[in-house]
Amino acid sequence: MAAAGVWEEKAQKIAVGAVAQSVVLWSIGGIVLAVVLARWARGPARTFVVAAVAFTVLSLAGPGLAQDTALSTQVVLAATHVVAATVIISILARRLSARDADR
């Protein structure tokens, strides 16, 4: 696949490792958000899901606004965002719910 960033004019190849690295990096961000919410939010699981879904929707702007990128690549990148977010959000929300029930 080749895609251009939002402010780039020319598409560059995307390596599979770059996709995996991005998923891991943003997953760490989600974990940090979950830890912060577990400590200070009243309903950490619900708050986390709302915030994480909002961030996921915002992340779809990247593939959607990428110039010089084939529509098929934009769809695959958007689907990758949604699949990764679904997995990570559900795991972290379940952990937060279980932790909240133990209190």
Image (cartoon, helix red, strand yellow):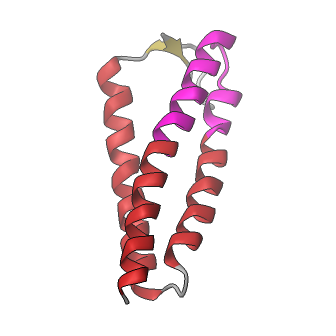
Residue 51 appears in which quarter of the rendering? bottom right
Q: Position of residue 27 (x, y in %)?
A: 37, 50
Please check the rendered image and state whether residue 89 is part of the magenta-colored stretch, yes or no: no
Q: Residue at x 35, y 84 (%)?
A: 102
Q: How many marks?
A: 0
Camera-side residue: 100 or 58? Answer: 100
Q: Main secondary structure of the magenta part?
A: helix
Residue 64 appears in which quarter of the rendering? top right
Camera-side residue: 89 or 9? Answer: 89
Q: Position of residue 5 (x, y in %)?
A: 56, 27
Query: Is residue 5 visible from the viewing direction of this image?
Result: no
Please check the rendered image and state whether residue 82 is part of the magenta-colored stretch, yes or no: yes
Q: Residue at x 63, y 20 (%)?
A: 74
Q: Quadrant of the C terminus?
A: bottom left
Task: Answer above or below: position of 101 versus 19.
Answer: below
Viewed as shown, does residue 22 lie left or right of 80?
left
Q: Residue at x 51, y 29 (%)?
A: 80
Q: Residue at x 67, y 38 (%)?
A: 61
Residue 6 appears in which quarter of the rendering? top right
Query: Is residue 80 visible from the viewing direction of this image?
Result: yes
The region drawn magenta spans 60-85
Camera-side residue: 86 or 30? Answer: 86
Camera-side residue: 98 or 53? Answer: 98
Task: Answer above or below: position of 52 versus 5.
Answer: below
Q: Position of residue 35 (x, y in %)?
A: 36, 73
